Amino acid sequence: MSYKMAAVGVIFILLPMTWACAPQKADYVMVSCFPNAIIANVPECPYGWEIGQLSLGGMCYNGINTPGFYRFTIPDLTPKNYSYCGTLSEYVGGKDPRYIFYNSIVSNDSSLTVRNQPVNYTFSCTYKAAYLVNNAVFSQRVATVYVNNGSLGSFKSQLSMNVFTNSKFLYAKDAPYVIDTSEIGSEVFIGIEAKGLSNRFKVVITNCWATPTPFSTDKKRWTLIQNSCSLDNTVIIFENAKDSRSMFKFNSFRFQRLEKVSTVWLHCEVQVCDGEKLFCQPTPCTSRSTEFEPDPNGGILTMEFQVRAQHSSSYIHPAGPFLCLLAIFLLNEYLGYFSW
């Protein structure tokens, strides 16, 4: 009997030596329900599990190791790929129809013996119904972020991008956002804010760019912010990654040789950073900050700006090469949630 107890004691002492990462408590998870992507962050090395031992939907070992977290992304919510890595979708009808997407992050040890406590992060995101045959068109300027912090409770935040009247950022304009042709070149004030989260969480704007179409992947684009640094000489970043709201401004413009286009779409890659676990401030801007292609870490919010002649509902192309066309697509706002 004593021999068996001694043997168990030796195994217990040697077991930590086999861990490649320092085990973390698995009582923290952040799920961001963006318009066309879902991003789930779980603690790095939960209960000793390495990133190669955790899978999305029990199928895809596609997690990315970011500082302090393992990040799993469902990048495509369109009907043609709604089952990405085991993602399930459900339509709920009624007076307030919704689409719900489900998935989970689970541990899987293929070795003969399992020494870590199994983990299973089951989450879901709910969107107000606006689903087309080939595209998922949910509210493009709004996301929902959920944080479950174990015994400290759960937090819900609505992350939204808005146009404000001036640099005081007190009053948001109503959508659709219209710029009169006489105001081409005027200043546009953008604020991205997370409401409902504690002060420990910071909103970080990583990249912003404009396209002549609603597609953020359009190769015809004009970059405003790259790697949290201004790339357009009219851009001024007032605040970024300091608290729950980040703000910047730029001067309106249009894309040349696209006279028939009356809108331009503004896209911003955003992430919510936990200031108690990570250092959220971007590195100081240097020439090297804009030499490299952005490394997407967050979700994308999109806005549509329309240019119209005064007292007209149709677009009139004025003379001159600089006509503002910026844009965001606004549908019904959506809600999101996740469950354990």
Image (tube, grey):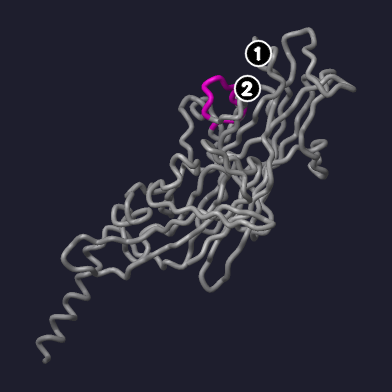
Query: Can residue 226 be seen in this snapshot?
Result: yes
Name the residue beneath numbered marker 2. Answer: 212
> Residue drawn at (58%, 43%), measured in percent from left and top?
131
Residue 301, percent across and down? Answer: 61, 39
Q: Is residue 117 above or below residue 192?
A: below
Quadrant of the rendered image containing residue 259: top right
Q: Quadrant of residue 239?
A: top right
The residue at 13%/81% (across/down) is: 7
Kindly identify which numbered label has been placed on residue 258: 1
Left or right relative to 123: residue 241: right
Q: Are marks 1 and 2 in contact (CB under 8 Å)?
A: yes
Stretch in magenta: 217-226
As drawn, is 238 to the left or to the right of 144?
Answer: right
Local crowd size for mark 2, using a 10 Å CA cut-off: few (<14), some (14–19), many (≥20): many
Nearest to the observer: residue 179 or residue 193: 179
Q: Secondary structure at mark 2?
A: loop
